[in-house]
Image (cartoon, rainbow, N blue to C red):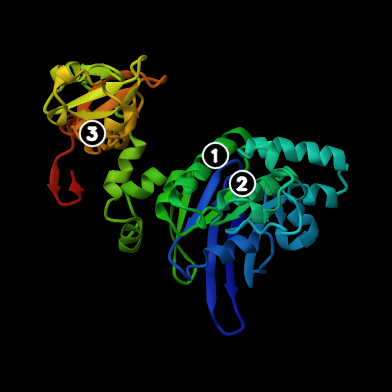
Amino acid sequence: MIRFESVSKKYPDGTLAVDELDLVAPSGRITVLVGPSGCGKTTSLRMINRMIEPTDGRIWLDDRDTASVPTHELRRGIGYVIQHAGLFPHRTVVDNITTVPELLGQDKKRARARAMELMERVGLPAQLAKRYPAQLSGGQQQRVGVARALAADPPVMLMDEPFSAVDPVVRAQLQNEFLRLQGELGKTIVFVTHDIDEAIKLGDQVAVLRVGGHLAQLASPADLLAAPADTFVAEFVGRDRGYRALGFAGAGRLPLHHEHSVALGSGLGEAREAGVDGWVLVTDAEERPQGWLRTDRLADAASGETVVQEQLNLGGTLASENATLREALDSALSSPSGRGVIVDGSGLLLGTVTASEVLARIEQQRVAADGPSVRRTGAGEAS
């Protein structure tokens, strides 16, 4: 557990970066610090491992005041990952990962074996072990940075915007890999980001800081979206917070419709007959959805042409049978046919659902949550 106890940081020029911060980051959980530029989130993070010394207050690591622990000893138990990975450019991937264990006196052979295990764990192929950082992509460098931070098996991890320097696709992959790793390892993590979507996706709890280093709200992602503490938090979280909040509510058993689909390689005449409202869903031979086909643009069925991958409209995300309301609604809204595709755990087609049906389920859940005794008396009020 990490506990901030009335912690402040004031610089010699009078700048107050953090002002009497009280905050607890529970053991084995991810606490995300988020807020606008100048809110003190990175300063707060760096005060944990004393890269920045607090001006006032105390920071506790479990039952130890970090100010009473020699910095070199403190940092041995804390992994640190930064935005651009901070790798040593003259050292190979495997040597970067083994840096801390070897400094701590670990046998070189054992350290390298552990490094190879960590590379696999963070999704790096073994053939990259002898490459240098300049020979890696940005996403690969970030993975090396995470592996290096894990190499000494620290109980605490500090992560300062580690995924912000990569493109959106790679960033999503890194976030998913990070959550998978945390599920296996259960580290105590403090994570800094300026992106509220990243904070909501990754955090077990989210601390929203306002300029001047004041804590505006500390809450779970679901509670933060459902009940912002004030106008500042509401505006920072965003106007579409209601839609994002659907990501924390299961859709349950949706009223699925049987979808007349055709398989890749089928005749276009068959596709024309199966189409509904100008669209037909195309699957592979095992009934895994592949995309949508416009039936009003099909060639003459007599031509003998068949449905091929290049003819498909790939718009429309797939939602699983255990989807959240947000995933189910997105599948319908993003589908060119207006019908969201629902699949089972193996990716096999179960059926389709419309946006209006998902919205009806949202309303049902809202009414059920309010309860029969709740009577609306005005905006935001109930009695």
Please give the name of the residue rendered at 27% of the width and 34% of the height, measured from the top-left corner. 331
Residue 328: in sight, yes or no?
A: no
- Position of the C terminus, as image quadrant, is top left
Badge 2 or badge 3: first in the primary sequence: 2
Q: CA distance from mark 2 to mark 3?
A: 34 Å
Q: Is residue 242 above or below residue 336?
A: below
Q: CA distance from mark 1 to mark 3?
A: 27 Å
| Residue topped by disc 2 | 143
Badge 1 or badge 2: first in the primary sequence: 2
Q: Which mark is residue 177?
A: 1
Residue 217, percent across and down? 42, 56
Looking at the picture, tell me which residue is in the foreground, 382 or 256. Answer: 256
Q: Dot 2: what SS?
A: helix
Q: Could you tell whether 25 is left or right of 264 in the image?
A: right
Residue 304, percent across and down? 21, 17
Residue 210, percent across and down? 43, 66
Q: Is residue 70 above or below residue 254?
A: below
Please give the name of the residue rendered at 35% of the width and 60% of the height, measured from the top-left corner. 236
Q: Could you tell whether 138 is left or right of 224 in the image?
A: right
Looking at the picture, tell me which residue is in the foreground, 375 or 216. Answer: 216
Residue 105, percent across and down? 88, 48
| Residue topped by disc 3 | 332
